[in-house]
Amino acid sequence: MVNVGSFDRTLRFVLGAVLVAAVFVPPLAAWVAPLGTWKYALTVWGAVMLLTAAMRVCPAYSLLGISTCRTGRSS
């Protein structure tokens, strides 16, 4: 079952890409360097956001009964 709509999917993809790239791209790495080991947690969070955007399924949405898809679409 798909529960991530197109706007939500785009937002997850963009934010996830920024969070993953933040550790590797020098200008962004300077911003996250003071976070210490928390920067790795941000990277994992970004990877999860990219995965949920690609799969169009959010486990948290499933547990909470939330769907950002239009009502007429089931796949």
Image (cartoon, rainbow, N blue to C red):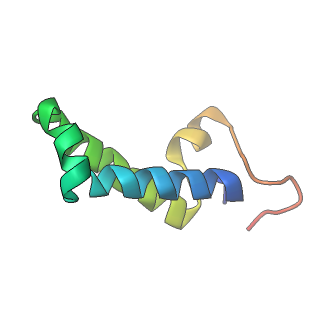
Q: Residue furthest front?
A: 27
Q: In this view, does 63 lie to the left or right of 28?
A: right
Residue at 59% over, 61% down: 56
Q: Is residue 72 left or right of residue 41?
A: right
Residue at 30% over, 55% down: 20
State how many labels appear.
Answer: 0
Foreground residue, 29 or 52?
Answer: 29
Q: Is residue 10 left or right of residue 68?
A: left
Residue at 50% over, 58% down: 13
x and y, in percent, of residue 73 in the image = 82, 63
Q: Residue furthest right?
A: 72
Q: Residue furthest left?
A: 36
Q: Is residue 35 above or below residue 8?
A: above
x and y, in percent, of residue 27 in the image = 23, 51
x and y, in percent, of residue 8 in the image = 64, 50
Residue at 69% over, 59% down: 6
Quadrant of the image containing the N terminus: bottom right
Residue 2 visible, this orientation: yes
Residue 23 visible, this orientation: no
Quadrant of the image containing the C terminus: bottom right
x and y, in percent, of residue 51 in the image = 43, 60
